[in-house]
Amino acid sequence: MIRKWDEAQLREALRLYLVMGSPNCNGADPYAVLEAAIYGGVTMFQLREKGPGALQGPERLALGSRLRRLCAQRGIPFIVNDDERLALELEADGIHIGQEDEAAAAVRKRLPQMIVGVSAHDLGEAQSALSDGADYLGVGPQYATRTKLDAREVQGPAGIALLRAGGIALPLVGIGGIDASNASHVIRAGADGVAVVSAIAAASSPREAAAELRERIVNL
Ligand SMILES: Cc1ncc(COP(=O)(O)OP(=O)(O)O)c(N)n1
Ligand SMILES: Cc1nc(C(=O)O)sc1CCOP(=O)(O)O
Ligand SMILES: [Mg+2]
C-alpha cells in the first residue's frame, strides 16, 4: 500500500496543525482564515465543522471543497474530523477520530490509504490506538479550552511526557488551550507539534498568530 505521507513527513506536517470550522472564525471567511494561517506557517489542517452554527449538508460540502483545494495547492495535508463519508467525498488526506467516534481499527481497515489520527488521553488509549493502526495521536486537553465543551480534564504537557515515557513513539500533537505563551512546553514534553483552534482561527490576524506560534515551536 502506497501512502502519500510517510512518517517523517507526517511528523513535520504535525508541527503546527490548525483545527477549525466556520463557527471558530468570529464571522470571518474560513477560506481567508486558512489562507492567512498557511502564509503564517500552518503545516496541516483539519476541517472540524462542529458546534453551534456549524454548516450542514451541501453548504458543509461546498466549504470543505474550497478548503480541501486550498490545502492541495499549498501542499499541506487536509484532514476531516469525525465524518468518514465527508472525508471520502472530499478526497481528504486523512480523518481524525476520537474515543467516542467510530472504532479506529475499523476506520483504518476501511481507509488504508488515509492518514488516521486518533485522540488519546492516557497510555492505555494510546497503546490501543497504536495497535489499531493510528498514524498519529491528538493528546489533550493540554490547557483549559472554551472551544470543546465536552473536553476531558486538563492534563497538561505532563500527559504527553507520560506517553513518551511509556514507550509511545507515534507522531503526536498536543491540543487544547495552546497558544504562543505555552506551546513550547508541549513540544518540550515530547510532542511533534501543536494543534490549535482559537489561538489562530479567532485571532485578529491569523497570519501573525500562526507566525508567532511557529516561531515559538521551531528551533527549541
Ligand atoms: C488533533 C486533534 N486531536 C484531538 C481532537 C479531538 O477529537 P475528539 O475527541 O473526537 O473530539 P471532537 O474534535 O470530535 O469534538 C481533534 N479533533 N483533533
Ligand atoms: C478539538 C479539541 N480537542 C481537544 C481534546 O482535548 O481532545 S481540546 C479541543 C479544542 C481546542 O481548541 P482551542 O485550541 O481553541 O483550545
Ligand atoms: Mg470526534
Image: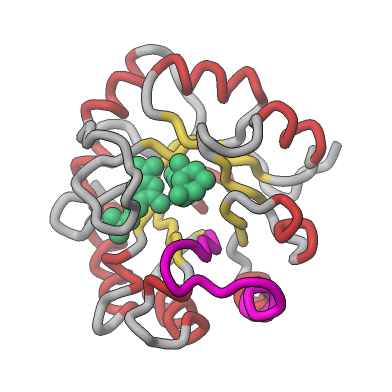
- Within the image, what quadrant is residue 63 found in? bottom right
Above-or-below relation of 217 to 67: above
* Position in image of residue 15 (x %, y %): 41, 52
Asked if the magenta segment contains residue 89, the reply would be no
Give the answer, above or below, for where 48 lies relative to 135.
below
Residue 187 lies, in percent from the top left, at: 28, 41
Report x, y in % for residue 168: 45, 20
Q: Position of residue 180 (x, y in %)?
A: 19, 60
**Is residue 51 in the magenta section?**
yes
Residue drawn at the location 27% of the way across and 62% of the way down: 213
Give the residue at x 64% y 31%.
104
Residue 77 vs residue 188: left or right? right
**x 21%, y 27%: residue:** 158
- Of residues 43 and 136, the one nearer the viewer is 136
- Magenta-drawn segment: 45-66
- Going by the picture, which residue comes out furthest to the front? 52
